[in-house]
Image: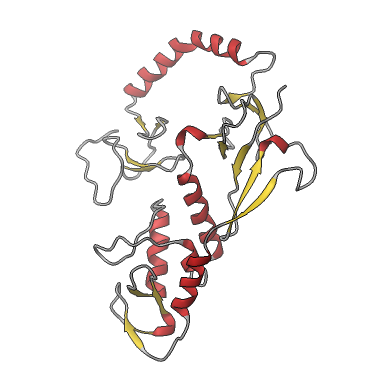
Amino acid sequence: MMAASPISLLINYILPSFIVICKANNFHSTNNEANGFQSVEADNDNEKQKATTAYQGKSSKRFSCGICFDSVKDSKMFTNPSCNHRFCTKCVSKYVKLKRKEKVVKLTCPEPECSSKLKPQQFQSILPKDLLVEWESAIYESSVSLKHKFYCPYENCSILMVNDGVKVVTSCECPSCHRLFCAQCKVPWHVDMNCRKFQKSTRDEKQLDKKFLELAKRKKWQQCPKCSMHVQRKGGCEHISCRCGCNFCYGCGKDWIHGHICNIRRS
């Protein structure tokens, strides 16, 4: 069994100011240093300073919220440091929560026609910590190239991992479910068989793949336009959120954008 190469685990819960990365070449070690846990400080000092400045010097002045248009005390206002648009903390919190519920990662200013970006660091005193952590994690995941990331092949795990490509990886242990898998074949570990033999044996399964595709077509399953995973909708609207982070229309299979209208209906 070959030693596992550096594969970074996306931790589901990370501090807003840090991205915690676990390197798989030390998964079997016993202490934190050997396990390869490293805290990489995010480069957000400037954002923190801007956010702090936006909340300093509070007075009794009142301003109009750009969302609800109510007159709100300065101490209850959020100012986007990138564009200086103002919103009450209640409205902007609801805005961020709604966007994250819709799986939107790159949030922009709520002001119409404004493309200024919103970042988690700007909301540390407004949003719940768990939401900030989840948002940070989503941003990190979206920044990883699709060809470098993959998911644990075990269905009840499916945690995201990142192959940095430094070494050729074969046998690896998932740091979440602790089961072996092959990072080259992207399948549970093929015991007593190297990758070449395993991949040769899978060629005989092409007929099964063909039958599966026929079944998917007959059942009118849709494919994710990003990772090509087949999806079967059990109910609800046409808006599908794939585990890879892609949002698409179940009817036409196209990327989901705000205001999307689809005339294709699937059963």
In this rendering, is residue 178 above or below 38?
Answer: above
Q: Left or right: where does residue 238 sit relative to residue 4?
A: left
Which image quarter is the N terminus in?
top right
Indicate the position of residue 248 as horizontal and vertical percent values: 33, 41
Among all residues in the image, which is located at the extreme left? 263
| 243 or 53: nearer the viewer | 53
Which image quarter is the C terminus in?
top left
| 131 or 261: nearer the viewer | 131
The residue depicted at 49 percent of the width and 10 percent of the height is 203
Among all residues in the image, which is located at the extreme right? 30
How many dots with numbers?
Answer: 0
Indicate the position of residue 216 as horizontal and vertical percent values: 37, 23
> Quarter-wise, where is residue 6 in the image?
top right
The residue depicted at 37 percent of the width and 67 percent of the height is 82
The residue depicted at 22 percent of the width and 41 percent of the height is 262
Indicate the position of residue 166 as horizontal and vertical percent values: 60, 32
> Quarter-wise, where is residue 112 in the image?
bottom left
Q: Left or right: where does residue 129 sit relative to residue 257?
A: right
Q: How is the image coloured?
A: secondary structure
Indicate the position of residue 186 as horizontal and vertical percent values: 55, 26
Q: Left or right: where does residue 144 sit relative to residue 181?
A: left
